[in-house]
Image (spheres, rainbow, N blue to C red):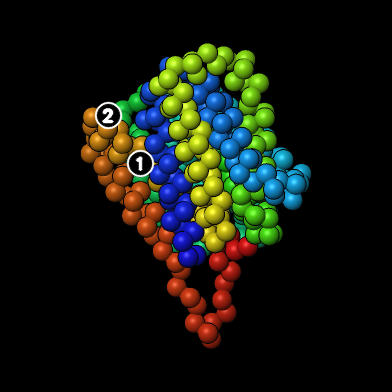
Amino acid sequence: MKNGPLAVVAAAVLWGTAGTAGLLVSADSVELAAARLVIGGAALALLARTGLRQALRPGLLVAAVAVAAYQLCFFAAVGRTGVAIGTVVAIGSGPVFTGLLSWLMHGQRPSARWAAATAAAVAGCVALIAGGGAQAGGQVVSGVLFALLGGLLYAFYAVSAARAIAGGTPSNAVMGVMFGGAAALMLPVLLWQGAGWLGEPLGLLAVLYLGLGTTALSYFLYGRGLRTTPVATAATLALAEPAVAALLGLVVLGERLAPVSIGGLVLLGVSLVAVALPERTARADVPEKAPVGAR
């Protein structure tokens, strides 16, 4: 898989810094998500402008809708269940849905090691976030359903991107179409919610970092990673995001981790290493099985 897993983990590290950067902004979560996606999507579209026409296809345009819808589902989920449960269900279900979609849509059956490591990583993610003691809101059932839908939407656009890249479309163009299209869809949301807070210097700097760093650069790296990394593996490696967010909270914000969160962090780290390590090549006298998400 060459350097693909490293690129995916680098993208997840950038995603993990978003929460800390968002604390510098006075906007609410929906306004912030819309501004981040508009700036990041526009940057990705400009980066890939020469290849956008090649990547314009119905599947990627539908994936662009999924990118925008994921943002709305995620914030609808956390608004109903609280941050802890909404985040665990949305982020934790993403790798599971990705593996299932890869199998059902493209016949790419996940390996036993991927399944075991992903299950352990999701468990670690649950322990990491639940150890913070956050409480759920009052509309738990509907919130969990929104979070599951968000996880499915993430899996759909990740699998769609991997499929297009495997078919020979440049990864920059794929991300440009998906996120450029999502930016166009989220622009009315940003204007409707109000963007006056962008006039604050600190808020503007923070949202530029969120758009250019945690969206444009991160998905540029994620697309590069998908060139050589099976999409199911990439989705599991992306669970490094909550680990980075927790470590930043510990180091930068002075937060404390409960013992169960520390255990979850360790379990998550070990699981991600297990997923990132390449599978041993089958012996010559044994029929070789197709790798996870082979493209």
Q: In the drawing, does residue 110 fall left or right of residue 279?
A: right
Q: Secondary structure at mark 2?
A: loop
Q: Is residue 18 left or right of residue 146?
A: left
The quarter of the rendered structure image containing the C terminus is: bottom right
Where residue 43 appears, as percent x and y from the top left, is 58, 37
Identified by mark 1, the residue type is Val
Task: Tell which circle, 2 or 1, labels the residue nearer the N-terminal end.
Answer: 1
- The residue wearing badge 2 is 253
Counting every numbered tag in the picture gives: 2
Q: Position of residue 25 (x, y in %)?
A: 42, 21
x, y (%) of residue 173?
65, 48
What is the CA distance from the residue labelled 2 to the residue labelled 1? 13 Å
Neighbor class of circle 1 (other Cα within 10 Å; few <14, some 14-19, many 20+) is: some
Residue appearing at x 45%, y 33% in the figure: 209
Q: What residue occupies the far bottom of the structure in this picture?
A: 285
Q: Residue at x 25, y 36 (%)?
A: 251
**Location of residue 22 (image quadrant):** top left
Of the residues shown, which amino acid type is indicated by label 2?
Answer: Leu
Report the residue at 56% width, 26% height from top. 34
Residue sitting nearer the eye, 286 or 250: 250
Q: Which residue is mark 1?
A: 244
Q: Is residue 185 left or right of residue 253?
A: right
Q: Does the image show residue 173? A: yes
Query: Residue at coordinates 45% horizontally, 73% vertically from top-left?
Result: 280
Q: Do tag 2 and tag 1 residues touch (Cβ < 8 Å)?
A: no
Question: Is residue 163 in view?
Answer: no
Q: Circle 2: is it few (<14), some (14-19), or many (20+) Cα within 10 Å? A: few
- Image: 285 above or below 259: below
